[in-house]
Amino acid sequence: MPHIPSATVSRLVTYLRILTELRERGVERTASDDLARDAHVSAFQVRKDLAYFGRFGTRGAGYVVETLQDELRRILGLDRPWNAAIVGMGRLGGALADYPNMDAYGFSLRAAFDSDPAKVGSAVGGLTVQPMSDLAETAKRESLDIALLTVPAEAAQTATEALAAAGVRGILNFAPVVLDAPSGVHVESADFLAGLTRVSYYLHANLAEHDGASVAG
Amino acid sequence: MPHIPSATVSRLVTYLRILTELRERGVERTASDDLARDAHVSAFQVRKDLAYFGRFGTRGAGYVVETLQDELRRILGLDRPWNAAIVGMGRLGGALADYPNMDAYGFSLRAAFDSDPAKVGSAVGGLTVQPMSDLAETAKRESLDIALLTVPAEAAQTATEALAAAGVRGILNFAPVVLDAPSGVHVESADFLAGLTRVSYYLHANLAEHDGASVAG
DNA sequence: ATATGTGAATTGATTCACAGCG
DNA sequence: CGCTGTGAATCAATTCACATAT
């Protein structure tokens, strides 16, 4: 497998969503032109992105929605369940714990942690908040793969190291800091203040172009 | 001004944060090497990013933290206040309304909207939730610049068009859909499910590299 | 006929090496 | 002498054109 641009990975997520919506609407076939229009990219780009991973279409006829959806789910690792935990049960952590459809997307929330003794033991979104000292044991028992990290900025690096030590290999970081990712751990940023600041830049510069960057909120 | 890569804009946000932290710690001078280390990029990259906008350092001596911080705030449009509103007062909207330090970052929350009559009139984070029908009037009265869009995916495009019609020029979109940005409106994505899916991809592909994309959470 | 898949061309971003200035 | 600022070179990503398959 050649090296895959990270922008390609982001676009694959978009294509998958479009295919999911097409399928819900009962559409059976589609084409790179259609996907391109909905994803706001060129049809060349769609075909090139898919070509990194194989051949999924039929020349002259386009793609079968269900087939391509399944392939993208497989490529993106969504053909298996991921066990996730929320670390930091402030307002944002609480909102994420109650977020609907996380299971539908293939992510199973299995635990919630907070270092504040006042929060430990409370119930949020069907989970009981545990102390950080339970992290290693719970991570092992629940086979935690991914953490949604919603602690304050100044606590994020310490929490990251605790997560790495506990065997968690993926972190979605909501804190407004650049994390030093321990070896073997993949970190994605989901930093809405950075997004707000980019909006500020583009408004300020009077550049009302198209969309911007990536991650989560 | 040449064209600025959007990756450069994202990195400028990071540099600004590092400078802010240095200043809080009382550090007066820094160098591209230091910023590079903290931002996880190369020193070449730091200097090239800054060079798009001017000359801010002293050869042989590096940068004055306070000066460079001020320049970056100006470049990113943070030297003026932005008036923001939350559109969609579900769990996530509520969490954002209570988010501390939004003012410190230069964003002033002035209004909150929801289409659900049951939510209208309730108080969240010092704001009274207004119906969507008030959008145009309130946007004008409060000079709303930016919306934090936290409505469900299926409502996001309609809300975007209402915001554009009300004169809001920047949208930070938390919904998991690609928005069709009306002319003159800049949209940034703050889509945490996309971030989670990218984590899934990198874990699945067993590529425990470094960080990924951008936006908010 | 029609739309995919892909090597080649182009564009863009990053890296480099060093000139320039304090 | 040190570190910035920047043109040139390298590397990567996107765009294109068309051969290919149905």
Image (tube, coloured by chain):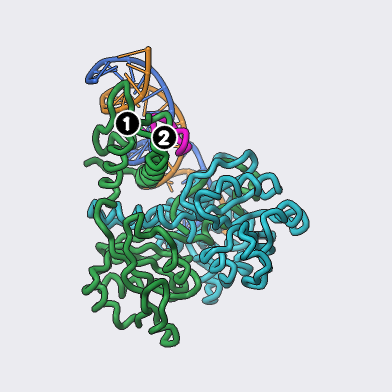
Chain colours: A green, B cyan, C orange, D blue
In this rendering, position of residue A133 left or right of residue B41:
left
* As drawn, A20 above or below B27: above
The chain ID associated with circle 1 is: A
Q: Which is nearer the N-term, disc 1 or disc 2?
A: 2
Q: Is residue A197 visible?
A: no
In this rendering, position of residue C17 left or right of residue A176:
left
Task: Give the extent of the magenta segment.
Answer: A35-46
Residue that mark 1 sits on: A63
**Residue type highlighted by circle 1:** Tyr
Q: Are marks 1 and 2 in contact (CB under 8 Å)?
A: yes
The chain ID associated with circle 2 is: A
Q: Is residue B204 visible?
A: yes
The disc placed on residue A35 is 2
The N terminus of chain B appears in which quarter of the rendering?
top right
**Residue A122 horizontal/vertical position (percent):** 41, 82
Q: Residues within 10 Å of mark 2 (few under 14, many from 20)?
A: many
**Residue B85 horizontal/vertical position (percent):** 64, 59
Q: Residues within 10 Å of mark 1 (few under 14, many from 20)?
A: some
Our reading of the magenta stretch's main secondary structure is helix
**Residue A175 horizontal/vertical position (percent):** 46, 67
Does the segment drawn in magenta span residue B192?
no
